[in-house]
Amino acid sequence: MTFAEHILAFISNLNLPLALPPDVAVMNPFTDAQTMKICETFYNKFYADTHDRWMIMGINPGRHGGGITGIPFTDPIRLQDVCDIKNNWPKKQELSSVLIYEMIHAFGGAPDFYKKFYITSVSPLGFTKHLKNMNYYDDKGLQESLKPFVVDWLNKQLMFGINRNALFCLGDGKNFKYLQQLNTELGIFDRVIPLSHPRFIMQYKLKTKEHYIQYYLDQFRKYGTIFS
């Protein structure tokens, strides 16, 4: 199987059969036929091979990016303008997607980047509360009940062909703490590398975003020998 075939089989079988906290809803973009068609186009374009890749792990999809397109940190604008995949969704931007694709441009472009990296999330399914984005760690009960699914999802994705010398974590606070603890328990990766979350950078550190982009690239070079 190609890397793309592994990904598509994985996302097409995602479900979350557990009781959620009050007012919390799960967001599964992969139940939408248009989203799955776009995912097939995207992954077959960039992942139709059997190369190993480094994993970059975010929190969970948001409503205006991966929650629509099914592709982590990729809003409909970047999907069309950068990845050259036309789509009919409203062209609303997601701040995290803006930063990630500026970093991808600095890396050398989408084909080179996706040849080296696979972006996913602790929870490939998103969450909303009162129709607003919610992170898996915002509710302690949700975080704890998700753990068996997170471990199962992670183990399945490792079978795609993941380099285990480093896991790059988007979010150097709660997401990093969670993944660091999980990796200590499971012993999967040699190290977990924290990176400031793209949304944090765009909201609070916009004037110095180039510094953060360079830091991303420096960490990829240091721990992944990405440019070799």
Image (tube, rainbow, N blue to C red):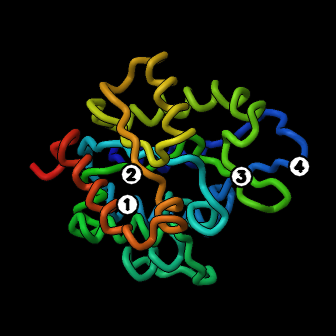
Q: Earlier in the sequence, mark 4 or mark 1?
A: 4
Q: Earlier in the sequence, mark 4 or mark 2?
A: 2
Give the SS element for disc 3.
Answer: strand
Three-letter residue code for mark 4 = Asp
| Percent of width and height locating residue 13 | 61, 43
Q: Cα distance, mark 4 to mark 2? A: 35 Å
Drawn side of residue 89 relative to residue 154, left or right: right
In the picture, residue 51 is in which quadrant? Answer: top left
Q: Cα distance, mark 2 to mark 1? A: 6 Å
In the picture, residue 212 is in which quadrant? Answer: bottom left
Image point (45%, 44%), residue name: 57
Q: Mark 2 near mark 1, Cβ–Cβ under 8 Å? A: yes
Camera-nearest residue between 50 and 117: 117
Which residue carries the number 4 mark?
23
| Percent of width and height locating residue 104 | 31, 65
Can you tell which of label 4 and label 1 is closer to the viewer?
4
Drawn side of residue 187 relative to residue 52, left or right: right
Image point (68%, 56%), residue name: 31
Can you tell which of label 4 and label 2 is closer to the viewer?
4
Give the SS element for disc 4.
Answer: loop
| Percent of width and height locating residue 214 | 26, 60
| Percent of width and height locating residue 171 | 49, 47
Which residue carries the number 2 mark?
4
Residue 134: mark in rendering: 3
> How many numbered markers are drawn?
4
